[in-house]
Image: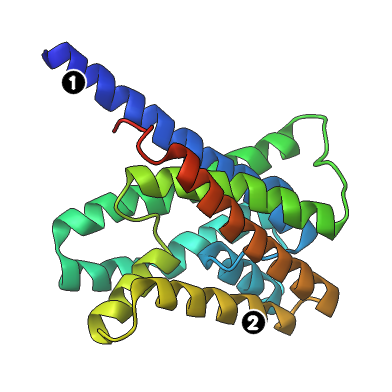
Amino acid sequence: MKSKIVKKSFKSFLLFNLFILLVGISHAIFLIPNKVVSGGFMSISMVLYHLMNLSGDEGILVPIIYVIINCPLLLLSYKIFGMEFILKSLYSTLVLPFFTILISSLFLLLPIDIPEMSIWTAAILAGITSGIGICGANLMSGSSGGVDILAKIMNHWYGKLSIGSAVSLNKILIVLSSSLVFPVENVIASIVSAISTGIVVDLTGKILRGKIDC
């Protein structure tokens, strides 16, 4: 009986990381190289990277900025929601930038380049990969970090604002903030990516809900 529980837990752990890996692929291959944002905290990190005119590799520095700006949210969420919530959120917050840096580093170390594509192709492919990853991870975890944590805090402070509405509001503001550093075409592509991500999340949820045994 105990071995079955351990096997089930290990299977769930691997599956959760596979979903987060898909989101990491979305950022490292499609979003960051093509300067398309998705509306999450990794997108804020991309905007900050360009606002600060940093010169290091974008695929590595953007995830590092992501971790830094998540720290205040994690501390605040600890005070509001307690240790159990922050422990669940901490792993989710760290594993995404880890996978993003890992994939970006592989392209730097290996004699291959990230495939070139139009920003529209990147936006759609990012929506598909991140949509599947985000949905799957959220079906298995209490929080995926970033915008999810901020939305939960906003809902705690302003009860009339639902978590879903807070997530949508934050994503809209983040996408619009990309106009500070990116051309209008990239902003429109970002909106396409955000919409396609939402569509894929809903479709994936209908397919996977009840099928993931975790």
Give the side of residue 16 with respect to residue 63, left or right.
left
Q: Is residue 57 visible?
A: no
The mark lying in front, picked from 1 and 2, is 1
Residue at x-position 40% and y-position 28%: 14
Q: Percent position (x, y) of residue 199?
A: 60, 57
Please, is residue 84 above or below residue 14 in the view? Answer: below
| Residue 93 vertical placement versus 190 (above, below) | above
Q: Is residue 137 left or right of residue 128?
A: left
The quadrant holding residue 209 is top left
Kindly identify the residue that appears in the image at 75 percent across and 63 percent down.
Answer: 35
Pick whichever of labels 1 and 2 is earlier in the sequence: 1
Residue at point 34% right, 77% down? 162
Q: Nearer the viewer, residue 155 or 34?
A: 155
Residue 5's tag is 1
In the picture, measured across the screen, residue 204 lies left or right of residue 157, that is right
Which residue, given by chain and number where applicable, does mark 2 sit on? Answer: 177
Residue 118 image-quadrant placement? bottom right
The foreground one among 106 and 142 is 142
**Residue 33 position in % (x across, y down):** 76, 55
Looking at the rendered structure, the kind of residue marked 2 is Ser
Image coordinates for residue 106, horizontal then vertical, percent? 68, 34
